[in-house]
Image (tube, helix red, strand yellow):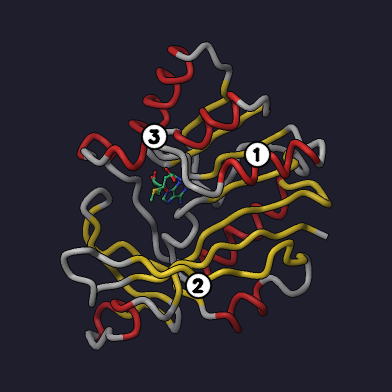
Amino acid sequence: MSVTKAWDWSKNTDTHWLKPCIEIPYLAEKWQAQGFKEFLDLGCGLGRHSIYMAKHGFSVSSVDLSEYGVEHLKEWAQRENLIINAAVSNMLTLPFKDNSFDCIMAYNVIYHTDTKGFLAAIDEIKRVLKSGGELFLTLISKGTYGFSTMKDKSRIVDENTILIDEYEAGDNIPHFHADIDDIKKIFSDDWTFEIFPVEQCEYNVEKPEFFSKHWIILLKKK
Ligand SMILES: C[S@@+](CC[C@H](N)C(=O)[O-])C[C@H]1O[C@@H](n2cnc3c(N)ncnc32)[C@H](O)[C@@H]1O
């Protein structure tokens, strides 16, 4: 299993990571209407989604490999007078009992591994999510420029995984990629699709040829 690294958030200068993603108001409203309360922000980074969900009345737990990220979230929560249970933890060994959460968000997180690691992370999510609970996650598509054009064999880890250098995390970070068949296969037995996977294309404005594609997926645990 390829090991992931914590992001070094002290290097970050992009305010994007402090503003909640476009999907979260939808999720907060949907999950509130379903009576969900216990929310896990898996790989919380600097904490933008944890803060948003705590402000919307959820009981929030947050984990990340990055000590800097978790400390940043704790200070932010204190400034906002919010109670958030934040801890440094690896997604493969979550410090929670079985069936702890109604809803889990893993936004640009659990693909920082290889196929074996990805499947293990899904198993760990399944363990801590209640039956009938929901998981929102993003995945990188095999249609992404870097994956579909990768020729350097030393950077190919397995059929779905390549090594990518990332500014905040360092060099040679494994990234798991999926196509629709992979998604259907991985989430066939224990999950139903609440919303069928949506593939989004992101363009680098200066270099549009280096586009990336992400899947947005909302699942319910059976
Ligand atoms: C792209 S950032 C996303 C942060 C946050 N979800 C957001 O949307 O603002 C990825 C985060 O995943 C964390 N991460 C990577 N591998 C992890 C692992 N094995 N366990 C827990 N967190 C991990 C990194 O430290 C980083 O904070």
Label 3 element class: loop
Dot label at residue 46: 3
Q: Earlier in the sequence, mark 3 or mark 1?
A: 1
Neighbours of disc 3 within 10 Å: few (<14), some (14-19), many (20+): many
Question: Compared with residue 92, is residue 13 higher up or lower down, i.e. above or below?
Answer: above
Question: Which residue is denoted by mark 2 in the rendering?
Answer: 115
Q: Earlier in the sequence, mark 3 or mark 2?
A: 3
Looking at the picture, does residue 15 appear above or below residue 170? above
Give percent across and percent down for residue 18: 37, 35
Q: Quadrant of the N terminus?
A: bottom left
Q: Is mark 2 within 8 Å of ligand 1?
A: no
Q: Nearer the viewer, mark 3 or mark 2?
A: 3
Question: Where residue 132 sits in the image (x, y, percent)?
Answer: 83, 51
Task: Look at mark 1 in the image and give the residue it sits on.
Answer: 28
Query: Decide: marks 3, 2 in contact (CB < 8 A)?
Result: no
Looking at the image, which residue is at 41% across and 39% down? 45
For this rendering, which residue is in front, 71 or 192? 192
Q: Are marks 1 and 2 in contact (CB under 8 Å)?
A: no
**Against 96, is 176 above or below?**
below
69 to the left or right of 38:
left
* In the image, the residue with mark 3 has its CB under 8 Å from the nearest atom of ligand 1: yes
Q: Earlier in the sequence, mark 1 or mark 2?
A: 1
Please say if 56 is above or below 149: above
- What amino acid is found at the position of numbered circle 1 in the picture? Ala
